[in-house]
Image (tube, rainbow, N blue to C red):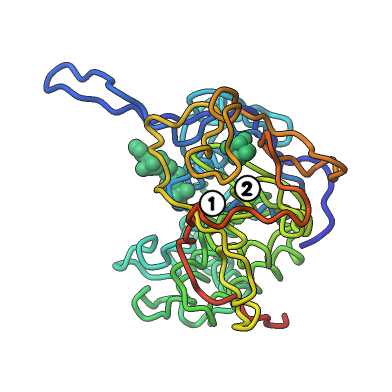
Amino acid sequence: MTAQGEVLVRVEDVHKHFPIKQGIIFKKEVARVHAVDGVSLEIRRGETLGIVGESGCGKSTLARCVTGLHPVTRGRIEFEGTDITTLSKDGLKRFRRDVQMIFQDPYGSLNPRRRVGSIIGDPFAIHGIADGAERKKRVQELMELVGLNPEHYNRFPAEFSGGQRQRIGVARALALKPKLVVCDEPVSALDVSIQAQVINLLDDLQDELGLTYVFIAHDLSVVRYVSDRVAVMYLGKVGEAAAVEDLYGTPRHPYTAALLSAASVPDPDEAERAERIVLTGDVPSPIDPPPGCRFHPRCPKARERCVAEEPLLTVKGADAPDHVAACHFPVEPGERLAREHAAIEQESTEPELPEVSS
Ligand SMILES: Nc1ncnc2c1ncn2[C@@H]1O[C@H](COP(=O)(O)OP(=O)(O)O)[C@@H](O)[C@H]1O
Ligand code: SF4
Ligand SMILES: [Mg+2]
């Protein structure tokens, strides 16, 4: 949560489609999943960009494109000015030193049969950096950095708690001093009390090491707590993006407004007063997304134009230049959306993250 500067990553009109094939001998493409469908955004050096949206909206796929784990179907991703979508194998390997991921599942992402020292040392092994005693020393420094006891170097993942296992994942991600760390729902699988510890650790490390984060979550309160700016995704597209206080203060996209109203309100008195916009219907399939505005089947403000014409991401009213929304009929400050249009239930109704001083 530091002041942001120049652009570190520029994502331009990125598409990632997964073909669905059928046939026994000659496999033929019969449809495609439009997992990410024309996303443009910037990640600035030193900031935390939050990405939020319901399950299946393309957050992880976008993260994998940005970190070079998925080749893109179309579009450009510039990292420090270089297009990474056209890098050679060697170039990609060098790029992967600068960009690391932390995953949701601290259980599934660690091999149970390997000792944590060797797991954390993986990046050194892959890139042929530091060997033997030198590698052990550097791994133990990393363990200390993330709040693990370096003497537990020879233990197995099962001997650690969930929060400690996520610390192992953080240590491994930081081994090569990356410039960008993409955290894909890093605390979603953890107890709320442990969530705060891991988030505070990430925050401290950001200050200490000058890291840039992309922080993905479906829980709006977590994203608000950690982010400088937030992008809201819906069905493979960005619906709205803004500085955190602008997005939560004056949401312009009806989907953002609905997500915010559905988010849990910790104070029961306030919860009773709070207007919950209830929207019906499931998220449509990314195989055949609705025409025009993808949100129109669930939007309380939808009109004919929304079906005919896709809205572009633009600044609305007197909003800040970096507050953009893709909507023909944006929410006005203080406007109340219709309630009868049934809700986007948030995936999680966990209480708001407790404040823990770091
Ligand atoms: N490897 C894949 N092959 C086919 N479809 C995929 C693949 N990965 C993700 N998808 C689909 O792409 C869409 C977006 O998925 P994902 O990026 O995981 O969303 P999120 O992280 O927001 O929950 C979903 O419909 C998902 O089923
Ligand atoms: S463009 Fe229309 S359907 Fe889409 S969010 Fe705006 S008002 Fe709703
Ligand atoms: Mg995901």
Question: Mark 2 or mark 1, which is nearer the start of the sequence?
Answer: 1
Q: Position of residue 157 (x, y in %)?
A: 37, 73
In this view, the residue farthest toward the right is 318
Q: Position of residue 332 (x, y in %)?
A: 76, 48
The residue drawn where x is 81% and y is 60% is 2
Quarter of the figure with the N terminus: bottom right
Side of 7 where 157 appears, left or right: left
The residue drawn where x is 71% and y is 63% is 206
Q: For the residue carrying disc 1, how many other residues have a C-alpha within 10 Å: few (<14), some (14-19), or many (20+)? A: many
Q: Secondary structure at mark 2?
A: helix
Asked whether mark 2 lies closer than 8 Å to ligand 2, one says: yes
Q: Position of residue 46 (x, y in %)?
A: 77, 53
Q: Which residue is mark 2?
A: 254
Asked whether mark 1 lies closer than 8 Å to ligand 1, one says: yes
Residue 286's image quarter?
top left
Task: Answer yes or no: is residue 95 visible.
Answer: no
Q: Position of residue 210 (x, y in %)?
A: 76, 58
On screen, residue 162 above or below 275 = below
Quarter of the figure with the C terminus: bottom right
On screen, residue 185 above or below 354 = above
Q: Nearer the viewer, residue 109 or 122?
A: 109
Q: Nearer the viewer, residue 164 or 330?
A: 330
The amino acid at mark 2 is Pro
Side of 9 where 147 appears, left or right: left
The amino acid at mark 1 is Gly
Side of 116 where 76 appears, left or right: right
The residue drawn where x is 47% and y is 78% is 191
Q: For the residue carrying disc 2, how many other residues have a C-alpha within 10 Å: few (<14), some (14-19), or many (20+)? A: many
Q: Which residue is mark 1?
A: 53
Q: Secondary structure at mark 1?
A: loop
Q: CA distance from mark 1 to mark 2?
A: 13 Å
